[in-house]
């Protein structure tokens, strides 16, 4: 048991026992992180490194934090979203695992940023982000700490977009590995994880029947593909809205209806945004939504739905059930917003299945080790996950599932590497 003097700001330390049970349950589905944790405990590759992480405080994240701690890192954790924290897990991290944690489910914006500040008060040498809020604060209000930072990682599409923009403007001051772009992350976490957990969150919040419902999905990246696939599997009539012509074409070839967002707004019943951008559902869409339309977001920030416009266009609102806000429009239409427009899968449910996060967080742990091993050698830019590391995580996951695959023979390797072989 950790010392009860561990720093942190959580809802209720008496919830710690339930949090431990939840963390241990998640660990059953995270064999790759377990293998890394066991090696880290022996080798201590992160000995003495101060690491501040701004991630969703869930049972899966807890297993990552524990692995990093066992690897020798001094971990400080804060929430990357006000509604995604599991309060019992946060309590357990402080009370039982000795990891300073600053996260309370439902915290207001002031508390959210106070917690970010607390994570930076640890004077991190490495950062882990889910959305780049910690890194952004470090580059603006807390830039005095930048000189001591070795590098960082980024977990999500939205964060990579922000970091790429920073790098393009010459504003990124230390190397960051885009964990989100690893094949073992976006192929699985974004597609299967977001797909399943988004429908789970919406179902828990609303108890709707998916079969026969017209579901409009804004964005057909890896997350959009996953949501569309799962909604289709539940019998929904899926409509996709896109700005990228190649992705729109892919959605058509996958068998989905593709149309302009305004036209989709007129016929849709359930709307899910996964674009990583601004106002995929804006004022012009809200004006033509049918009575009873339900709006949900599974992108990182709640900017994907123009919530300010929704409030301005309504005459009243009420919480009809947990995570369901009913807005009465001036013309009498009723529009429903789920989870305040925040990540519906983490706000109204438990987020991605642990088995999926196993690969994502294996990437995080190994990338932290890679950054430390290569400190001083990486440019201040957004870096890809080393392909060999990506492949090793895939191999370990297959191994944990009892699956073996073929390897190339020497002759096959020679054939692939030579330009002289052919017909």
Image (cartoon, helix red, strand yellow):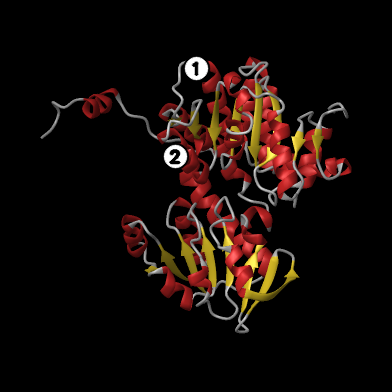
Percent position (x, y) of residue 306?
A: 56, 63
**Vertical side of 150 occupied by 267: above or below:** below
Percent position (x, y) of residue 294?
A: 59, 71
Residue carrying label 2: 165
Q: Residues within 10 Å of mark 2 (few under 14, many from 20)?
A: some
Q: Nearer the viewer, residue 95 or 136?
A: 136
Q: Which mark is residue 374?
A: 1
- C-alpha span from label 2 to label 1: 24 Å
Looking at the rendered image, the quarter that the N terminus falls into is: top right
Residue sitting at x 15%, y 28%: 421
Looking at the rendered image, the quarter that the C terminus falls into is: top left
Q: Nearer the viewer, residue 399 or 86?
A: 86
Percent position (x, y) of residue 128?
A: 60, 33
Residue sitting at x 64%, y 75%: 314
Residue sitting at x 63%, y 23%: 145
**Vertical side of 337 occupied by 130: above or below:** above
**Vertical side of 224 occupied by 1: above or below:** above
Q: Nearer the viewer, residue 310 or 127?
A: 310
Foreground disc of the pair 2, 1:
2
């Amino acid at each position: 048991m950790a010392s009860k003097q561990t720093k942190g700001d959580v809802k209720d330390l008496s919830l710690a026992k339930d949090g431990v049970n939840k963390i241990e349950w998640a660990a059953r589905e995270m064999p790759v992180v377990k293998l890394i944790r066991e090696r880290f405990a022996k080798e201590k590759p992160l000995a003495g490194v101060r690491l501040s992480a701004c991630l969703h405080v869930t049972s899966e994240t807890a297993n990552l934090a524990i692995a990093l701690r066992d690897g020798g890192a001094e971990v400080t954790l804060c929430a990357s979203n006000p509604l995604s924290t599991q309060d019992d897990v946060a309590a357990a991290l402080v009370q039982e695992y000795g990891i300073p944690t600053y996260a309370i489910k439902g915290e207001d914006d002031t508390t959210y940023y106070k917690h970010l500040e607390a994570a930076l008060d640890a004077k991190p040498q490495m950062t882990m982000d889910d959305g780049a809020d910690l890194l952004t604060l470090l580059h603006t209000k807390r830039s005095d700490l930048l000189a001591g930072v070795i590098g960082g990682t980024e977990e999500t599409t939205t964060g990579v977009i922000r970091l790429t923009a920073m790098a393009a403007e010459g504003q990124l001051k230390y190397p960051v590995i885009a964990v989100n772009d690893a094949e073992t992350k976006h192929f699985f976490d974004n597609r299967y994880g977001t797909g399943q957990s988004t429908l789970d969150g919406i179902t828990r919040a609303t108890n709707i029947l998916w079969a026969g419902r017209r579901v409009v999905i804004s964005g057909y990246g890896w997350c959009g593909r996953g949501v569309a696939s799962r909604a289709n599997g539940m019998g929904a009539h899926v409509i996709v809205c896109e700005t990228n012509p190649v992705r729109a074409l892919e959605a058509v070839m996958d068998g989905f209806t593709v149309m302009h967002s305004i036209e989709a707004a007129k016929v849709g019943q359930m709307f899910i945004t996964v674009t990583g951008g601004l106002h995929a559902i804006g004022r012009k869409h809200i004006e033509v939504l049918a009575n009873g339309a339900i709006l949900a977001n599974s992108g990182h920030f709640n900017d994907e739905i123009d919530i300010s416009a929704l409030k301005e266009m309504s005459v009243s609102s009420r919480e009809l059930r947990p995570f369901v806000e009913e807005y009465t429009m001036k013309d009498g239409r009723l529009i429903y917003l789920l989870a305040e427009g925040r990540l519906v899968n983490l706000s109204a449910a438990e987020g991605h299945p642990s088995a999926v996060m196993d690969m994502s967080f294996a990437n995080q742990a190994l990338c932290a080790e890679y950054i430390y091993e290569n400190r001083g050698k990486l440019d201040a830019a957004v870096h890809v996950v080393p392909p060999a590391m990506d492949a090793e995580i895939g191999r370990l996951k297959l191994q944990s599932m009892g699956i073996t695959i073929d390897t190339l023979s020497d002759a096959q390797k020679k054939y692939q590497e030579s330009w002289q072989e052919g017909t």
